[in-house]
Amino acid sequence: MAERRQVRQEEITLAKHLISLGGLNPEEYQLAEMVDDYENAVMGSINFTPPEKAEYGGDIVRVVYKDSDDIPVVITLTKNVNNEILDMDFWKKDFSKLQTYPTPDKIAIFDQDMI
């Protein structure tokens, strides 16, 4: 597993917004200060929980974002079985590197027709 790093403010901002979009109160979820990058940070996916707490418990919300190269990116915020934030998973349609990190005003609730 990759070396854990400090969570960035833009990641916290996006995660809290996604929690809200999922109909939950962001104040009830403590986000980890240290995270792991997935895929060597190519698409932006991060894991908030240590391996011993990483059992998938379901999706909170799925949104879509158009990267600055106009390629759609699906972002899914998930929780573990303990109802803690598990990860924020990015999937870029063409599997290329994320160009610009999304901000809350640039995302929309996921609709299959958007990708």
Image: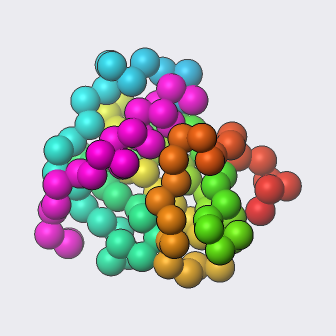
Occupied quadrant, residue 109: top right
User: Residue drawn at (68%, 43%), measured in percent from left and top?
Assistant: 108
Q: Nearer the viewer, residue 60 or 97?
A: 97
Residue 34: x and y in percent read 16, 51
Q: Residue at x 15, y 62 (%)?
A: 4
Q: Which residues are magenta?
A: 1-21
Question: Foreground residue, 67 or 42?
Answer: 67
How many tags in the picture?
0
Quadrant housing the N terminus:
bottom left
Q: Is residue 71 left or right of residue 21?
A: right
Is residue 27 part of the magenta span, yes or no? no
Could you say where residue 98 lies in the image, as x and y percent from the top left? 50, 71
- Identify whether 53 is placed above or below 39: above
Residue 47 spot, x, y in % from top left: 31, 55
Q: Nearer the viewer, residue 22 or 51?
A: 22
Q: Is residue 83 visible?
A: yes
Depicted 108 relative to depicted 74: above or below: above
Q: Residue 33: x, y in percent?
A: 17, 44
Q: Which residue corresponds to the image point at 56% horizontal and 65% vertical from the top-left?
A: 91
Q: Is residue 112 left or right of residue 24?
A: right
Quarter of the image that includes the C terminus: bottom right
> According to the image, what is the colour scheme of the structure?
rainbow
Magenta span has 20? yes
Q: Would you identify the image quadrant in which residue 26 lies?
A: top left
